[in-house]
Amino acid sequence: MTGSPRARLTRDDWIAAGFEALQATGPDALGAEPLARRLGTTKGSFYWHFKDVPAFHAALLGRWQAEAETALLAASGVTDTARLRATAQAIGDSPHHDSPALRCEPMIRAWARGNATVTGPLRDVDGLRLARLRDLLAACGIGNPEMARILYAAATGMQVLQDAGRDETANAIGSLVDLILALR
């Protein structure tokens, strides 16, 4: 008796497996062989979808970058203050996000420390987020650009606090936004 045929893996399947492996093990798990073992298939399937491992890394980082930019635009509110709070909270909440790509942000930041390929997309996302925070702070009457850096550093720092849940992150970042706004 033969088993049922295995479904063909898609490019998205490989990218999803990459985010799972990155979250569970770190960037050393992002090679063709470890991912193929993880998916119970051959490396040939990997190379069908990606020219090489750097091309896979570029696709993985491109997906993360696109989702980070989409999440930034999705942070909304009726007032500038509400948009500022929602934006800062969304950044800090990445490890609790529904998206596997966004949940990997702390690992992507760690990976960037040892890999120049990762620093470009990370720098781009950081730049967009900082600009958004600066614009929202200015709209709220806070003109000091360093406040955006302080708020961003706190939000990205919240990503690595393993014991902080979604509510704790939102409350802490919300309190910092309130403190900054009280300086007006």
Image (spheres, grey):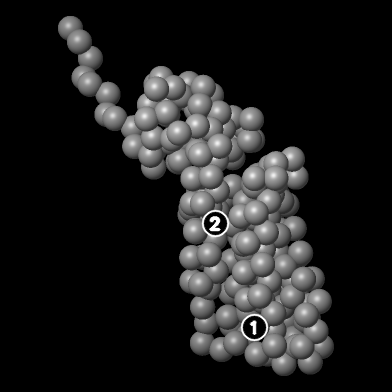
**Quarter holding the N terminus?**
top left
How many numbered dots are placed on residues in this image? 2
Q: Earlier in the sequence, mark 1 or mark 2?
A: 2
Q: Which residue is mark 2?
A: 65
- Residue 45 horizontal side relative to residue 66, left or right: left
Q: Identify the residue at horizontal 50%, vertical 38% (top origin).
A: 56
- Quadrant position of residue 51: top left
**Which of the two discs, 1 and 2, sits closer to the camera?**
2
Q: Identify the residue at horizontal 61%, vertical 55% (top origin).
A: 121
- Residue 152 horizontal side relative to residue 78, left or right: right
Image x and y of residue 72, in percent: 55, 69
Q: Which mark is residue 26?
A: none
Q: Nearer the viewer, residue 170 or 87?
A: 87
- Quadrant position of residue 141: bottom right
Q: Identify the residue at horizontal 59%, vertical 40% (top origin).
A: 23
Residue type indicated by callout 1? Leu
Q: Is residue 175 above or below residue 164?
A: below
Q: Which residue is mark 1?
A: 136
Q: CA distance from mark 1 to mark 2?
A: 21 Å
